Amino acid sequence: MPRNPFDWIDEESRRRERAGLVRTLRPRPADSALLDLASNDYLGLTRRAEVTEGAVRAARRWGAGATGSRLVTGSTELHAELERELADFCGFEAALVLSSGYAANLAAVTALSGRDALVVSDAGNHASIVDGCRLSRAETAVVPHTDVEAVRKTLEAHPGRRALAVTDSVFSVDGDAAPLRGLADVCREHGAGLLVDDAHGLGVLGAGGRGALDAAGLAGEAGTVATLTLSKSLGSQGGAVLGPARVIDHLINTARTFIFDTGLAPAAAGAALAGVRVLRGEPGLAGRAREVAATLHRGLTDAGLTSARPDAAVVSVQAPSPDAALRWAADCRAAGLVVGCFRPPSVPDGISRIRLTARADLTDRQIGTALSTIIRTAPGS
Ligand SMILES: Cc1ncc(COP(=O)(O)O)c(C=O)c1O
């Protein structure tokens, strides 16, 4: 009898189980009573009436789907309006909306590098940047985390080469920020482009949540390009690339994840546009998200837990092992609190963590409940 061609999957699955690395889906009900500190809904916009109404209005006017790729029938006036408002809000010349932040990173990294180019990528970058580097066929130098000197040395070793340095603005595992000004200086000195993934900065950093590049005084700089997700602070779905108009034109003509992908669904575009308008109208939301993160961090460190100081709204707490992290997250859930759980291979340094995302709409009472639950269920307590 011939072997089943997928038998190897069972062996891999057993290996994952032995290592405590099994992942499972857990569909959540619409009306969950659990306190959520795991989502990326930093400003609590995903259920805000303005944002859900933005989605409904857009679906009614433009249909449920975009009907085609952006270069064929999938660009509506709504997409163009969203692009203008995103660029204007974040301080860039132009923007291009894609179907996800993942697609935006693949688009930006591949279109701005290429086979003969050098990409200098931070070791802590998001998987979508890592995949963009792989797809680009560029020579990729992975440099130690937030190490500006390593970026300088790498660029120095390749004079005259087309080069792109790429980094998350806020790293999704530990919540620390990239040294954007130092990176921009080094890139300028060496004629390299700087690409910053501001997935966790938009809505949390900068004036009124205009993002990490606004905070660093780099928004709209000639050599700087940003990618965004519309799925975190803006409460919708989708992604975007922001930069000089010639960079955006280049992406429209060359970026495969833009060209060969159906345009963003109108409902998502309408919700994201409404999200940007909420941010404009409520500039205090970003500061509140940061304040909640600082309160969580303080409470955890006062209780003796190891938590890196949050530079934005991601709060990370170390666990002694992948198993302990899993058990900790499960004990929190049993007590009514949902937290994220990060373990290898999502964390290349091998340190497992639980991760909390601070939300601007959490009440002081909810923050207190979250802290006491995490501290009470901590490994060894
Ligand atoms: C840093 C970072 N970049 C990119 C993405 C991908 O964005 P999206 O979920 O919109 O594909 C994420 C997470 O989702 C992220 O955390």
Image (cartoon, rainbow, N blue to C red):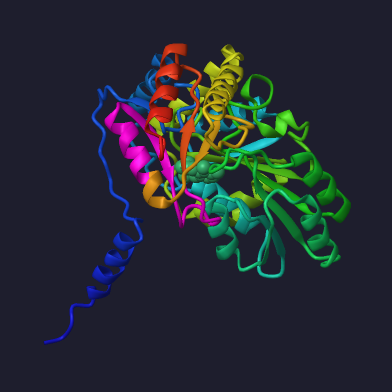
* Quarter containing the N terminus: bottom left
Q: Is residue 99 visible?
A: no
Q: Is residue 42 above or below residue 330?
A: above
Q: Residue at x 60, y 61 (%)?
A: 133
Of residues 365 and 68, the one drawn nearer to the viewer in this rendering: 365
Q: Describe residue 90's horizontal placement relative to residue 351 as left or right.
A: right
Q: Is residue 346 visible?
A: yes
Direction front: furthest residue: 381
Direction left: furthest residue: 1
* Quarter containing the C terminus: top left
Of residues 381 and 273, the one drawn nearer to the viewer in this rendering: 381
Q: Residue at x 32, y 66 (%)?
A: 15
The magenta stretch spans which residues?
Answer: 326-352
Q: How many marks?
A: 0
336 within the magenta span: yes
Q: Residue at x 57, y 12 (%)?
A: 281
339 within the magenta span: yes
Residue 312, image x and y in percent?
61, 30
Direction bottom: furthest residue: 1
Residue 182: quarter of image: top right
Of residues 81 and 374, the one drawn nearer to the viewer in this rendering: 374
Q: Is residue 216 above or below residue 348?
A: above
Q: Is residue 278 above or below residue 237?
A: above
Residue 193, image x and y in percent?
76, 51
Direction right: furthest residue: 189
Q: Describe residue 296's horizontal placement relative to residue 329 as left or right.
A: right
Q: Describe residue 59's horizontal placement relative to residue 251 as left or right.
A: left
Residue 136: quarter of image: bottom right
Residue 156, image x and y in percent?
85, 62
Residue 33, image x and y in percent?
27, 22
Q: Residue at x 47, y 12 (%)?
A: 364
